[in-house]
Amino acid sequence: MPHHALEVRGGPDAALAARLRALRAELDVPGEFPADVLTEAERAAAEVPGRVAADPDRADLTAVPFVTVDPAGSTDLDQALHLQAGPGRDELTVRYAIADVPGFVAPEGAVDAEARRRGQTVYLPDGRVPLHPEVLSEDAASLLPEVERPTFVWTFVLDAEGAVASTDLVRARIRSRAQLAYPQVQALLDDDAAPEAADWPAEVRASLALLPEVGARRTAQEAARGGASLSMPDQEISVVDGAYTLVQRVPLAAEDHNAQLSLMTGMAAARIMLEAGVGILRTMPAPDPDAVDAFRARTRALGLPWGEELDYGAYLRTVDPTDPRGLAVMHAATTLFRGAGYTAFDRGSVDPALRALPEDPEQAALAAPYAHTTAPLRRLVDRFVLVLCHAHVAGEPVPDWVRRALPDLPALMAESGRRASAADRAATDLVEAALLAARVGSVLEGTAVRTSEKGTDVQLTDPAVSLRVPGRAEPGTVVRVRVDAVDVAAGKVTASGVDWPHSAR
């Protein structure tokens, strides 16, 4: 899928910067790490590498040419990959290394307690609020290139159809060969002579060249089970030369392929924990039949009908989100799957609420049980899932500290998710208002993407801002909007439709 991006800069604004700083306090976003947390983290960063190097039970996979693939500028690197084809390319071996964060965090110690309070890394325009101290998340535990790092390495063998024929999980030492960004990898996939990849080792190029094949096989498996991935355009905030920038883009194909590796790992983790009877899943209920009927009606109204012969996932794979009608379909599709959460279970628990396996273990959008396990530097629950899965695969007892934490993890993750979502929405509102402050009185073009009793949501073309406008306009239509007033401090924009049809007034 092609990459589409639009950058719009807002002028340096001290008032906006001050509001963004104040936002952290208003939403109770954690601030600096306490002194005891920093001390414990620094001690772990200094001591753990030596213990890992001397551990005879840890596999030495430093000869495997792993690489990391992340957004440009990332420093908290959770995953590294290596792909290898078997004879005839029927079998593909996927090695997926995940940062061994449990090796750096003392169970029920100061870093652990602070991580439970934070729940996940929060990303804001004026800087991220990390889950762990930077000495771990951006240094000692991060899979930075050309340094030895402790990891959990998942190994999957895929058959010709992309089904997982075998799964293994070991604690290991690796040495990433390169830190790559998605655009660099996409350039290689588009042209194996791309100058961006000219200096990469041949073994790295050979591994990455298999990424589209792995992604295609896993996408075929997703389609076969009726699952779906919603490839919504991303709206990103960044700071360029002191000015806030909004970028709206469709994910690169390399990102979609790489996401399939994470999904495959999460599904394997869920299966392992369900079979063992101890674990925590990322669950989501199936959509309400009335919601499905309403979505079908909306697709017909948009001229992109969802036929009965296609399941939900297959239909979404036919939709182009760069087309105004397709974008409206994607927005409507988000209403189908709601209620995601975490479900913990432990057949050996004295708590009756934990003893039974989940009645409905599936993540409905994926049409399979699923667990978060590939981002332990940035998300609390992944650290526990890694330890659980390794214990189950190795035939070892689950550590008591993990079992004690299980009942609390769903609520901790739910609270951190609410805080992160609120911070993201509030920050986006502030930046959008700042970008439109100089456009008061201007008439701008956009696409109506959703209507409700509160009005019509419009995605502007330039700048890449989303507005709610009073009245109703047919989703998928191109409309014009006048910016009537802007309150940057409140992150509020007042707008009205221009020359909308009678039904929109």
Image: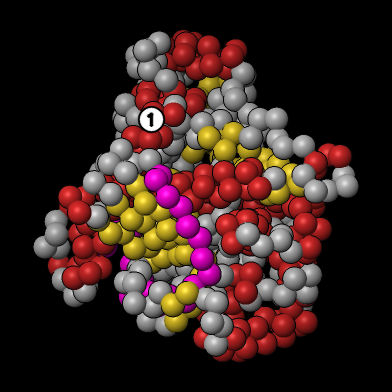
> From the viewer's perspective, is 207 left or right of 138?
left
Identify the residue under disc 1: 223
Q: Quadrant of residue 31?
A: bottom right
Q: Residue at x 41, y 65 (%)?
A: 80
Q: Residue at x 41, y 38 (%)?
A: 231
The answer to whether residue 251 shows anywhere in this view is: no
Q: Residue at x 52, y 86 (%)?
A: 53
Kind of residue at badge 1: Ala
Residue 125, compared with residue 467, is above or below; it is below
Magenta highlight on residue 430: no
Residue that protrudes farthest toward the front in the picture: 395
Which secondary structure is most common in the magenta stretch?
strand
Residue 114, compared with residue 263, is above or below; it is below
Residue 413, compared with residue 146, is above or below; it is above
| Other residues around mark 1 within 10 Å, as few (<14) / some (14–19) / many (≥20) | many
Range drawn in magenta: 164-185
Residue that protrudes farthest toward the left in the picture: 193
> From the viewer's perspective, is 333 left or right of 32?
left
Q: Quadrant of residue 227?
A: top left
Where residue 402 appears, as percent x and y from the top left, is 74, 60
Where residue 72 appears, as percent x and y from the top left, is 38, 65
Residue placed most toward the observer, 205 or 39: 205
Where residue 292 appears, as percent x and y from the top left, is 53, 16
Secondary-structure class at tag 1: helix
